[in-house]
Image (cartoon, rainbow, N blue to C red):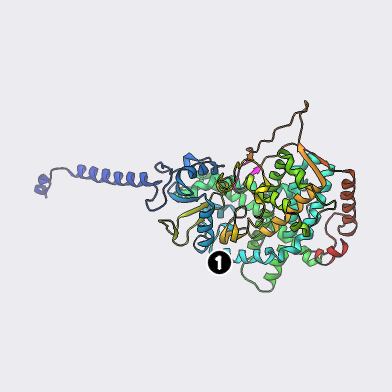
Amino acid sequence: MATIRRALPFSTATLGCVVLIAALSYLLYRLLGIGRRPAVLPPGPPTQAIWGNLRQCDSFFPHHQYTEWASKYGPVYTMMQGGQPQVIVSGLAEAREIFVKQGARTQSRPPSRFKLLMRGGYFPSVMNGLKWQHARRMWHAVLNSSASSKYLPYQELESEQLLLDMLNKPHCWYDHLERYTNSVGMTMVNGYRITSSDDPIVKETIEDLYELSRVGVRGNVLDLWPVLWKLPIYLLPICREARELAEKHKRFIWRNYTAVKESVKQGTTLPSFNRTIQERLQSGWRGVSEIEGAEIGQHLLSGATDTTVSVLTTFVAAICLFPGVQRKAQEGSERLPQYEDTASLPYIQQLILEAQRWITSVPLCLPRVANGTVRWGNYEISEGTGLIINAHAIHSDPGMYPEPHIFQPERWEGKLDATRPDNQLLFTFGAGRRHCPGQHLAERSLFMVVSRWLWALDTSQAKDKDGNDIPINTKDLRPGVINRLKPFQADIKPRSPERATLIRQVWRENCEYLLDQKHQWKLNPDINYKRVK
């Protein structure tokens, strides 16, 4: 043995050093390879080791950088979120091709352990498989075009209170819009009206959504680098925060769900989503548990609240900054608009579409992941690759929308089907097999509020003490998955004393015939609403 050792040109220690250096070199090579774009995917911006392109993007408003890259690398390019490739789709034709025509292969959500943690393990909008299918089936049962029509009385009544609130406290218009959307959603899901913007449920709902967005952005790092989950929990304070949020959220939705159960026992409940879930579970349906059913209902409430308020806030800003649009939209009938008037008010529909385009509520549609090989041009996007629709880029494409910063409803003349899958131009409600199931409901809400607001009210920029317009900053957005303009001042007045009188008269009749002393529904609108009206 000694003879062998003497024959070796290096010692055992030297050999160990060589092995260690080789191992470290390989580890460094693999580490530096994290963030590198796979050559088989569409090209994109230069990457950095480990980070990919993350450090080049704003955490809360990444769509601006994504849109800038699209102008350089084309409508379909690849950026790296850490070690995970994301194909960004920023062109209309490309979005239709990838997410609609090839929708069967682009319908999945990427795994998100952190988002599930924030919702106690059940978050249907980021899930796949049977869990997602059961939730989707429940949503479709109450939100398809025909089924959602039974919620129209809720929307009409809430829009009438909105007009009354605007007469009484016009400076609180932002709060009134939040009350409106919360009340429509809450009545639809739980059969309970939000009668005042001071109702704590309004604050709870908005805070729940905001915290989900805020904590989710911060915790996204754990989904980008899953190895971090191996760290001790005391080194991951964001996880403790997510668990606390999940417990708080569970208490909130369970309180609403059990309140519906109690009202069913008392025979006082209205048609609602949670009542439908409870009836199905009692009849033996085993697709979801009760707490999962409560979460599915909460998804509807969240969707009815945030996106609708975002578009309506954009509408208010637009008619302040473009008064000619308001004057044109106010031409026509002297009577209070009804939903049945939709077809005869095409300019109102065009205005609503332009509000969705001008400031995109969801600038980056919720991410997908290819669940099969997706073909685009000469590229094959392999299974497991992330996919994101850059709706902001599509909606602000100067090739489609000259001077995209100008609010111009005339763009949509002859294009009123712009949100329909077979002729989709707007992506407010997503695309393909993951489009928002509440689209019909949201579109009805938008029409009811916009048409009646324009009938009842004149809206303009507020003035300062010197009589100058107080600026409205359309870039000052609340961060999150859903962008929304922050509150701004506006001067809002009734168009005439006669219209103000009619609004108050309509509300007095609502209180007399439809509402009890607590301003909750005392009649089932399915049976009595049209007769009373």
Q: Nearer the viewer, residue 279 or 416?
A: 416
Q: Residue 6, how many percent across, how many down?
A: 10, 44
What amino acid type is highlighted by mark number 1?
A: Leu
Q: Is residue 8 left or right of residue 267?
A: left
Q: In the rendered view, tell whether residue 452 sits above or below residue 135.
A: above
Q: Is residue 11 left or right of residue 505?
A: left
Queried whether the magenta region covers residue 440, the answer comes back as: no
What residue is rendered at 86% in x and 61% in y? Answer: 533
Label 1 neighbour load within 10 Å: few <14, some 14-19, many 20+ = few
Instruction: Identify residue for label 1.
Output: 130
Q: What span is colored magenta in the figure?
A: 478-484
Residue 194, visible in the rendered structure? yes
* Picture residue at 50% right of the left edge, 48% below the top: 233
Q: Is residue 123 visible?
A: no
In the shown orientation, is residue 287 left or right of residue 508? left
Q: Residue furthest bottom?
A: 284
